[in-house]
Image (cartoon, rainbow, N blue to C red):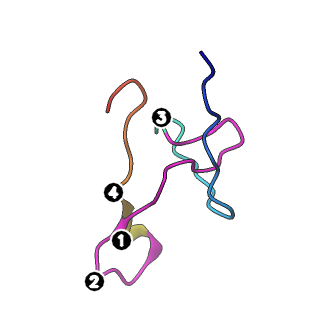
């Protein structure tokens, strides 16, 4: 059985090492990402709702 290597989203880096979508190269391989908080005014007020802990989901 062959496992397909996940596609990496071009230009989307990820520093969250415990997210299952973070690759060894620190890139996101989720099919899509969602960044939430429509009232955000700074980077720290946003968050990735695509996050899924490794070993979960």
* Numbered mark located on residue 8 in the image: none
Outermost residue, right side: 25
Q: Residue at x 57, y 47 (%)?
A: 29
How far apart are the two marked residues, 3 and 1, measured between alpha carbons? 20 Å
Pointers 3 and 2 in contact (C-beta within 8 Å): no
The majority secondary structure of the magenta stretch comes to loop
Task: Identify residue for label 2.
Answer: 39
Task: Identify residue for label 1.
Answer: 45
Q: Nearer the viewer, residue 52 or 29?
A: 29
Pointers 1 and 2 in contact (C-beta within 8 Å): yes
**Of callouts 2 and 4, which one flags the residue occurring earlier in the amino acid sequence?**
2
* Numbered mark located on residue 18 in the image: 3
Label 2, residues with CA under 10 Å away: few <14, some 14-19, many ≥20: few
Pointers 3 and 4 in contact (C-beta within 8 Å): no
Range of magenta residues:
21-43
Task: Identify residue for label 4.
Answer: 49
Q: Residue at x 43, y 29 (%)?
A: 54
| The C terminus, quarter of image | top left
Q: Nearer the viewer, mark 2 or mark 4?
A: 4
**Of callouts 3 and 4, which one flags the residue occurring earlier in the amino acid sequence?**
3
Q: Is residue 33 magenta?
A: yes
Residue 1: image x %, image y %? 59, 15
Q: Residue at x 39, y 23 (%)?
A: 55
């Amino acid at each position: 059985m062959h496992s397909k290597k996940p596609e990496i989203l071009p230009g989307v880096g990820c520093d969250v090492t415990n997210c299952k979508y973070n690759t060894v190269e620190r890139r996101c391989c989720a099919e899509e990402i969602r960044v939430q908080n429509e009232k955000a005014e700074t980077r720290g007020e946003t968050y990735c709702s695509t996050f899924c802990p490794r070993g979960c989901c």
